[in-house]
């Protein structure tokens, strides 16, 4: 729910009832998820669309003058998202900020989840103090995923922190943990880390509803048609290919202290109107 100034607040402790506002200056900060990786943009080489771009297009129809910036960069940890990216976002004077980070930290077994939550809390407090509304997102449930299912406990703890932070500061929450459609591997790219275009589309519609709007494309909740379960040989072959093409390069980068986001710059560093092609998809 929002008050008369358009700011979300708690109806009672721990409960947020979203009510839509006509936001006109939306800034997204985050990592590869918010950059939109694996949702390839056919209009630009080596560029991505992603859920945040799609959400911006949905929000833009409610105001005559709408502008959007996306400061997210693949591979970045929460230090960058809650630090430099938030600082750059504040300079732009947004009225809505989505902040999604910490996933790259959680992949590391030594991650201090409580420390990450404290860092995120400070960043959200700064954004809210500026007058901006804030959209947060929980991690997806990794329990059914190969390898990263070992992060389930850390991801669940971080999700609990996100709900606590949202309740404390009156933020909107995109609860990805509850999305059954994301348990279908057809929603994920071959790297098993980033979503397909349909995955990003559905998340954008879910985020739109989390902000209090009603999505006309109600199919985002509908599961994909059933498909035959792969046999053991197919599963082993697929796991081996994934390990060779995606897991091994990731491990090499970690050992070498490199990131997939090295030398990558934000795709939309300044608030600007959406081009015509950014209309709802």
Image: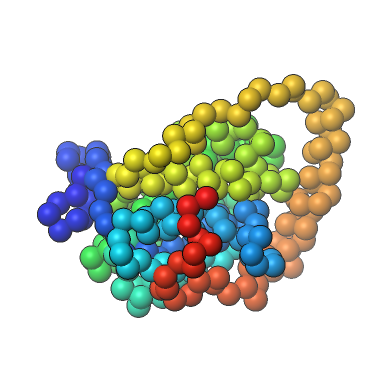
State the scheme by which the image is colored: rainbow
Identified at 59% across, 33% down, the residue is 183
Query: Left or right: 227 with respect to 61?
Result: right
Counting from the top left corner in percent of width and height, residue 248 is at 79, 53
Q: Quadrant of residue 65?
A: bottom left
Q: Is residue 171 left or right of residue 280?
A: left
In the rendered image, which quarter is residue 252 located in?
bottom right
How many tags in the picture? 0
- Residue 68: give x, y in percent of width and height: 41, 67
Give left or right: position of 204 versus 16.
Answer: right
Image quadrant in which you'd find residue 12: top left
Q: Residue at x 52, y 29 (%)?
A: 222
- The foreground one among 111 and 186 is 186
Above-or-below relation of 87 to 18: below
Residue 179, above or below 139: above
Q: Residue at x 38, y 68 (%)?
A: 67
Q: Residue at x 47, y 48 (%)?
A: 204
Q: Nearer the viewer, residue 253 or 180?
A: 180
Residue 27 placed where, x, y %?
A: 40, 65
Q: Is residue 262 left or right of residue 139?
A: right
């Amino acid at each position: 729910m929002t008050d008369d100034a358009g700011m979300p607040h708690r109806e009672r402790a721990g409960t947020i009832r979203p009510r839509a506002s006509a936001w006109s200056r939306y800034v997204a900060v985050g990592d590869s998820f918010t950059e939109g990786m694996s949702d390839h943009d056919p209009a630009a080489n080596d560029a991505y669309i992603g859920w945040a771009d799609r959400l911006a297009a949905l929000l833009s129809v409610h105001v005559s003058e709408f502008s959007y910036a996306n400061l997210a960069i693949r591979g970045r940890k929460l230090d960058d998202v809650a630090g430099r990216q938030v600082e750059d976002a504040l300079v732009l004077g947004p009225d809505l900020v989505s902040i999604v980070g910490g996933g790259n930290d959680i992949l590391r077994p030594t991650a201090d989840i409580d420390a990450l939550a404290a860092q995120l809390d400070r960043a959200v407090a700064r954004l809210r103090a500026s007058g901006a509304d804030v959209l947060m997102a929980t991690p997806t449930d990794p329990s059914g995923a190969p390898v990263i299912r070992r992060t389930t406990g850390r991801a669940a703890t971080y999700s609990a922190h996100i709900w606590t932070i949202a309740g404390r500061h009156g933020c909107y929450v995109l609860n990805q943990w509850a999305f059954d459609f994301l348990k279908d591997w057809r929603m994920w790219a071959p790297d098993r880390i980033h979503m397909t275009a349909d995955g990003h589309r559905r998340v954008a519609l879910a985020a739109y509803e989390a902000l209090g709007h009603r999505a006309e494309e109600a199919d985002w909740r509908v599961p994909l048609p059933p498909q035959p379960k792969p046999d053991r040989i197919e599963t082993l072959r697929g796991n081996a290919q994934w390990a060779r093409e995606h897991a091994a390069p990731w491990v090499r980068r970690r050992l070498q202290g490199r990131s997939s986001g090295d030398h990558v710059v934000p795709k939309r560093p300044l608030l600007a109107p959406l081009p015509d092609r950014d209309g709802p998809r």
